[in-house]
Amino acid sequence: LAYPCGLIALSYFNDGIQLYRFERDQETFEWRNSIPIGPPANVTVDTSNIAWQSDLDKKFRNPTVDITNGVNTGNALQYETYEYLWQRYDQFHCYDQDTGDGPTECLTWDMYARKFQNYNGSATLPGNGCAACANATSVLVNEGGIREPKDFSDSQSSLGVRTESFIVWMRTAALPNFRKLYGRLNTPGGFKKDDKLTFRIIPNFLVSSFDGKKGLVLGTASPLGMKNFVLGTAYLVVGGLALVLGVGFLIKLKLNPRKLGDPKYLHTKQA
């Protein structure tokens, strides 16, 4: 699946969501462009293990090329035929690894493919974001994009089409108002009362064209899942209806009982 087609893949939710500030008691921890400034806060956003395992196992495969001893042996990715997922969603920038300042110099997808992927076509590859940083003192920061596969020789390599947030998005919601799991917030010992988290949002996903709305929802999960008003309401309605019908059948049985095995209810067709 080199370039997923269809409206769902072409409308992937690519807002960047980054930690910005964490306040606990009298301490404040800050990030600049996802890079910790000062002492680390030990708060992370884990975006792994959020997709269905069956989707990962059976539905999504990355494009592959022949690689021997780490060298592309000739059949380079078909950049002039396809616009790959990581080119379309290339919302990455490079920032200084110590201070978070930037953006710093980076390689576009055209520059990266020519330098590292044996691409020598005449067309300029689309994508204005960063495919890699130009110097070793910078780090590549995700601002809503999708990375290329880690291993182009393995169709089941992570990232690329097998980016879990993309797989979650591709599973169609039943209703027009929906939530999609983005990740899990982790901190040693868990969060405490009066902890405050501030996020930085990079608004890549525009909703004004269709009068849509979007938001960031923080919640806690139990063994039964997260809070879901629609599912809870459906269970209550169906359960209430079943209770009313059950009571009705019970009253009918008491007022007009039917003897078990009563032959008068048998009708024999006359020859």
Image (cartoon, rainbow, N blue to C red):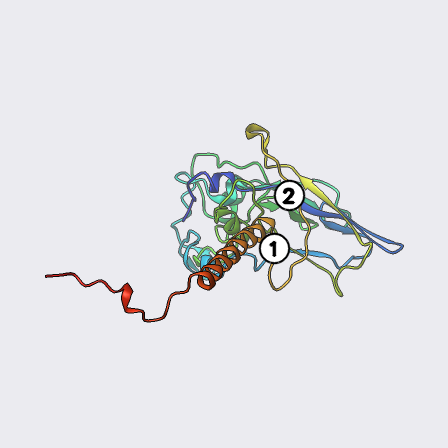
Q: Secondary structure at mark 2?
A: strand
224 sits to left or right of 271: right
**Spot occupied by residue 110 in the image (x, y as percentages of width and height):** 51, 39
Q: Residue furthest bottom?
A: 261
Residue 50: tell me if it is visible.
yes
Q: Amino acid at mark 2?
A: Gly
Q: As rendered, which of 39 and 164 lies closer to the eye?
A: 164
**Residue at the spot x=47%, y=41% of the render?**
8
Q: Secondary structure at mark 1?
A: loop
Q: Residue furthest left?
A: 271
Residue 104: tell me if it is visible.
no
Screen quadrant of the C terminus = bottom left
Q: Find residue 107 and report its image quarter.
A: top right
Q: Amino acid at mark 1?
A: Thr
Please determine whether, in this image, residue 136 is positioned above or below residue 108: below
Q: Which mark is residue 47?
A: 1
Q: As rendered, which of 63 and 181 lies closer to the eye?
A: 181
**Residue at the spot x=55%, y=30% of the render?**
210
